[in-house]
Amino acid sequence: MSQLNGEYPCTMDAKGRLIIPAALKKQLSKAAKNSFFINRGFEKCCILYPSNEWATTVEDINKLSDYIKREREFKRYFLRGAHKLSMDTSSRILLPKQLQDYAEIKVDVVLLAYGNKIEIWSQKQYDKMLKEQPVDFSAMAEEVMTKRRDDK
């Protein structure tokens, strides 16, 4: 599993292309082969997965049952709008128009890399998300991380 990290302000061109910053590109594994999958995020952003990480994610999703309505709906919602993207020789990817519209991406973009994925935010939505951060991040960390430790 990749361990991507960093926050990268970027600009999308008029054709919907976005350059993957060199510092982020260096973090990608050779197994990704300069290809990605993109889909809608849980919040108003897009999620970019290196292709090798997408394969692992889809493997987990496919373990859900088509016979259980809630699981079937989750699979459908999670996978809708997913596209395969390839990085060109200029390190650019082309964001699909419907995903640009979903995430309200116009020109100014923030790439937020963590774990095995990269969130693609419009600068406006990213700033809004940051303003809505929890009042007590320390309490949230205690709740979430203590639960994770107890589950192991």
Image (spheres, rainbow, N blue to C red):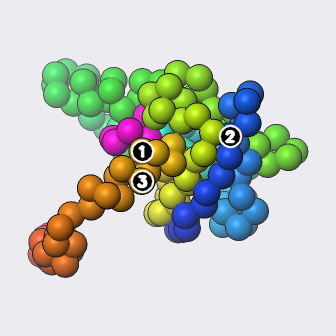
Task: Name the amino acid type tagged 3.
Answer: Asp
The residue beneath circle 3 is 127
Pick the quarter of the image with the C terminus: bottom left
Looking at marks 1 and 2 on the same chain, the residue that comes earlier in the sequence is marked by 2
Residue 93 visible in the current orientation: no
Which of discs 2 and 3 lies nearer the camera? The answer is 3
User: Which element type, helix, strand or loop, lies under badge 2?
Assistant: loop
Magenta residues, start to end: 40-45
Residue designated by label 2: 12
User: Label 2, label 3: how many angstroms apart (C-alpha)?
Assistant: 17 Å
Q: Is residue 28 above or below residue 126?
A: below
Image quadrant of residue 45? top left
Q: Quick one: label 3, few (<14), some, or many (20+) residues within 10 Å?
A: few
Residue 108 shows in this picture: yes
At a point 33% along the width and 27% down the height, the residue shown is: 77
Which residue is depicted at the point 44% across and 28% down?
A: 102
Q: Look at mark 1 in the image and give the residue it sits on.
A: 125
| Label 3 secondary element | helix
**Cα distance between the residues tagged 1 and 3:** 5 Å
The kind of secondary structure element at disc 1 is: helix
Residues 133 and 145: in front is 133
Q: Is residue 41 magenta?
A: yes
Q: How many marks?
A: 3
